Amino acid sequence: MNVLFMEYPKCSTCQRAKKWLQAHEVSFEDRHIKDDRPTASELKEWIARSGLPVRKFFNTSGMVYKELGLKDKLPNMSGDEMIEVLASDGMVVKRPLIVGSDFVLVGFKEQEWEARLG
């Protein structure tokens, strides 16, 4: 199985997730979430594939999220507007992201990763 691993290399959670992938011999393509941010069309597809609400894709503890005041703005935004915000800056997107052919995992939850990738 080959998956896309969207990460921010300086993020300690992403570093742990990458080590987990390597230890479990999961083959992956590495993509820097800030330098090569996901497009709106990729995000639409991934959100649909994940089965999660758009809000789960936001990095709510990130500085950009806070600077943009998204906590107060998101409740009044449409799904498409949220996707545009996510596509505007990779640092707004929760990481790491694992994108497989028929699934998407958001954040590093070891049990969830083990069940899907282990």
Image: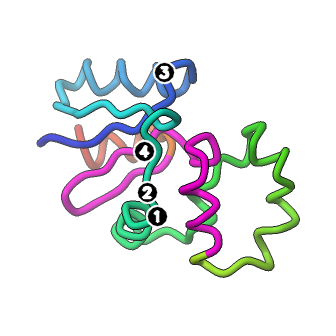
List the residue tagged with mark 4: 97
List the residue tagged with mark 2: 39
SS assignment at label 1:
helix
SS assignment at label 4:
strand
Instruction: Where is residue 107? Give x, y as percent.
Output: 51, 43
List the residue tagged with mark 1: 40
Q: CA distance from mark 2 to mark 1?
A: 4 Å
Numbered circle sitting on residue 9: 3
Residue 84 position (above or below residue 69): below
Q: Are marks 1 and 3 in contact (CB under 8 Å)?
A: no
Q: Nearer the viewer, residue 4 or 24?
A: 4
Quarter assignment of residue 91 = top right
Left or right: residue 39 compared with residue 10: left
Q: Are marks 4 and 1 in contact (CB under 8 Å)?
A: no
SS assignment at label 2:
loop
Numbered circle sitting on residue 24: none
Q: Residue at x 48, y 21 (%)?
A: 9
